[in-house]
Image (cartoon, rainbow, N blue to C red):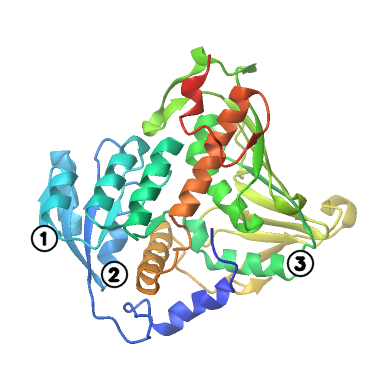
Amino acid sequence: MRQSLNRRNFQGALVAGGIFAGMKSVSGAIDDRKYRVGIIGATGRGDYGHAVDMPFTKLPNVQIVALADANPKGLSQAKERLKPQNSYADYREMLSKESLDLVAICPRWIDQHFEMLMACAKANCHVYMEKPFCRTMIECDQVRKEFEDRKLKLAIAHTAQYSPVLDVAMELINDGAIGQVLELRGRGKEDHRGGAEDMWVLGSHIFALMRTFAKRDPASCVAQVTQNGEPIRKEHVVEGNEGLGPLAGDHVQVMYTFNDGVMGYFGSRKAMAASPSRFALQVFGSKGILEIESGYLAAAHLLRDGSWSSGRSGKNWERVTSAGVGKPEPIKAGSYEDGHLAAIKDLMLAIEQDRAPKCSLTDAIGITEMILGAFESQRVGQRVLLPSKTREHPLTLLV
């Protein structure tokens, strides 16, 4: 979980200190080291995620040493855009033959993530990777051990966690702009993926934001997961899209208990999408609401109204940007690629300074606990404590 230091000032220090031109060591001297990077793609099976590969071509302190993709056509296309020194059909061969500092795990299908992560750890490589993380807590536990034993860093592409707008939002919360935080509410996109798939693919972004604003992991959760209005059973479980593994439920409702009496709520129901989307997190406080969408430089809004009802109070929502409340957004670089760049630069600084990245291995595991905790609560029919004692996938244990 991101540290509750003044992150806005930290972001400014990155710009002023020249991180966009190159890396610095802890002492502040320019580090002439180039990061030797390997890229793992899987064309046809998650591809290169949300173009996780391309930002590495934009960094002057990166040397793309090697590329791996088992699909010959995909490998050829990636070679054209990435210009690696060497290419491989098998990422394991790449990791065994090349001396790499950092590996980009690009595919979005998570059934491959565990083996890729374990291979990277054994090759002593730091990792930047596409989300979601892993399919089970057993996989999470093994990855944690391998990376922590080797003192390796991992950052995951929940790009909102690197946003300067989030810095300002956190400052507003800490300064009491909405009073005492009472609850957190988030929803997925609720399109054709609504329910359990939405919770995995897009809810993971919401859970990352929940943990940031709560400043801790939830202590417990209670959930209702249904399929066509019925509690999910073994016969409802299918193999999920994008390598998600066991999946069931077209309607998910979860409540999380954080410390200090703060409650978190997440919901997603299939075919209930709206325009504009409800995909966002709302932080409700005793004096108002702060809403933030998911994404790098995504919109945030503030309602200074303890009734939570602008219709009754007559108060208006105010736009929040990286410059503050009601001010125009001065930053123009707000694309998905810009989010990746911010994340990769933060990961490199984390390596240099021996600190956790803003969205780290611990965060990735905490988000996965929240997802699988919902399935476990439905399975046992009651509130479950987190971290859960059940490390297997709960849907494999349904009867």
**In this rendering, is residue 29 above or below 306?**
below
Residue 177's tag is 3
**Amino acid at dot 2:** Leu
Tell me the residue that label 1 is attached to: 85
- Alpha-carbon span between mark 3 and mark 1: 52 Å
Q: Which sits earlier in the primary sequence, circle 3 or circle 1?
A: 1
Mark 2 burial class by Cα count in 10 Å: few <14, some 14-19, many 20+ = some
- Alpha-carbon span between mark 2 and mark 1: 16 Å
- Alpha-carbon span between mark 2 and mark 3: 37 Å
Check whether the beta carbons of the residues at disc 3 and disc 1 lie within 8 A of each other.
no
At mark 2, the secondary structure is loop
Tell me the residue that label 2 is attached to: 59
Q: Position of 179 compared to 272: left or right?
A: right
Q: Which sits earlier in the primary sequence, circle 2 or circle 1?
A: 2
Say how many tags the image has: 3
Q: Position of 399 compared to 292: left or right?
A: left
Q: Which sits earlier in the primary sequence, circle 2 or circle 3?
A: 2
- Identify the residue at image location x=43%, y=43%: 132
**In x, y percent, where is residue 80?**
15, 54
